[in-house]
Amino acid sequence: MKLSKILEGIEVIGSYNDVEVLDVSQDSRLVKEGSLFVCVKGAAFDGHSVAAEMLEKGAACVVVERDLGLPNQVLVENTRQIFSFICANFFGNPAKSLKLIGLTGTNGKTTTSFIIKQILENSGNKVGLIGTVQNMIGDEVYPAKFTTPDPYELQKLFAQMVEKGCEYCVMEVSSQALAQGRVNGLRFAVGAFTNLTQDHLDYHKTWENYFNAKRILFENSDIAVTNADDEHGLKIIEGLDFDKVVTYAVNTNDATYVAKNVKFKPDGVEYELVGIDGIGRCSCPIPGRFSVYNSICAASCALALGIEFNDVLRAISMSSGVKGRIEVVPTPGKDYTIIIDYAHSPDGLENIISSLREIAQGRVVTLFGCGGDRDRTKRPKMGKIAAELSDFCVVTSDNPRSEEPEAIINDILEGMKDITTPYEVVTNRKEAIRYAIEHAQKDDIILLAGKGHETYQILPTGTIHFDEREAVAEILG
């Protein structure tokens, strides 16, 4: 493809040679003969430092944001912000052939996106999905490295979806992806907001930065779907123009769609969905209070897209859970229940434990830790929440990364010191699971919080394979 085609719609400073380009990349390790290398300055590495080396390696051209005096360079104002446009042009702007539904918020994005996909598919549409657990094109599953892929992988996925006949793409849109411009140039048919609580402040530094990153999604959406119960739900769309605004709620009647007469059961939730389209009984086979919010958000998105009211209710009743989200682990012959959940923020932990309390017949035992090299301020908060809401806690490691696990645990224990809930500290996560199982009582619910769908653990010594399902099976065996 000609360079001029790849740079269509991008403001270039000065002239350039219109060379033939075979591939594009911002990763110097992936550059090959004929590549276009985009020099992006990151926190630890600046692509400009290897621009000359990339040309020597065979790159057809380098895109820079400061004049390096190199042959075959293209000068632009901001390389990070235009990389997504370059990738879109390279793959033929496939997103323009898809209806994009983007979900942002602290919690609930993954499950909600799966429910939306299932609603749309039950209405006869072929749907792609991009998210934390996995990427999908119809029934085909592709591995997911990040919640929202980098622009190259994202546009490549869009192109594959279009090639395979997808009409819609439901995608989780993380705050980091929005802040880093990974979705620049995309127009969303629907932008949906789940909730906003403390998370990722290690990256965004301030709450205002976190909020404003989330808001970018709605600056680029035709329809806004937002949570009227969340204090940020209306603020995040304030002052923006939309073709339509749809709100949903459980605690207030002042919303487009409201969940009434909610009933919690061990195998799911039921409620009356009351809205402008009518009233209907909604049954979601995924337990927990947050399942009410996830399913009503999904319903609101589908209804905003024109899916029939009764078709939406029917599809939700047939929806299935997501790996690592209130996932019940097989414990054949045992009189207790083990549940795996990805909850790794204060709000996420509070939601899952509170939901389990509503269905628990015995104790709620919470096993959890906190990630290393991440926001330290949430550690004592999570400790306090777990101790206040659980009957027993097992404090252990999550992904300590470069930090000492014991130091992270000490931060957690600061939040538990004034609470009388009994707890045990077992640093090794597998041994912690063993401890919880060996001390389980009849009708206990043992919650393994934090790892969710992950099948690895990041330790100071490196990354190891670690799947909690396998650990439980081995211990029980």
Image (cartoon, rainbow, N blue to C red):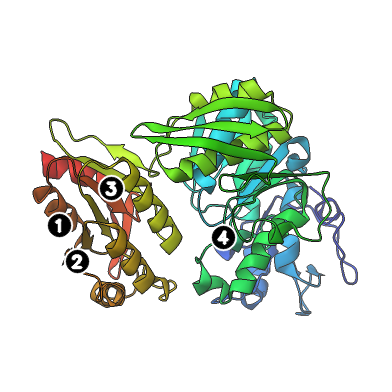
The amino acid sitting under disc 3 is Asp
Which numbered disc, 3 or 4, marks the residue that appears first in the sequence?
Answer: 4
Disc 3 and disc 2: Cα gap in Å? Answer: 17 Å
Expressed as whole percent of the image width and height from the top left, the position of residue 147 reads 53, 52
Q: Residue at x 55, y 31 (%)?
A: 272
**Residue 240 lies in quadrant:** bottom right
Asked whether the viewer can see residue 284, the reply is: yes
Between 146 and 297, the one lying in front of the other is 297
Q: Which mark is residue 431?
A: 1
Q: Are marks 1 and 2 in contact (CB under 8 Å)?
A: yes
Residue 326 relative to residue 135: left or right: left
Disc 2 and disc 4: Cα gap in Å? Answer: 30 Å
Q: Which residue is identified by label 4?
A: 196
Of all residues, the one furthest to the right in this rendering is: 14
Q: Which residue is identified by label 2?
A: 427
Q: Residue at x 67, y 74 (%)?
A: 52
Q: Which mark is residue 467?
A: 3
Between 444 and 28, the one lying in front of the other is 444
The amino acid sitting under disc 4 is Leu
Disc 4 and disc 1: Cα gap in Å? Answer: 34 Å
Q: Are marks 2 and 4 in contact (CB under 8 Å)?
A: no
Asked whether the viewer can see residue 160, the reply is: no
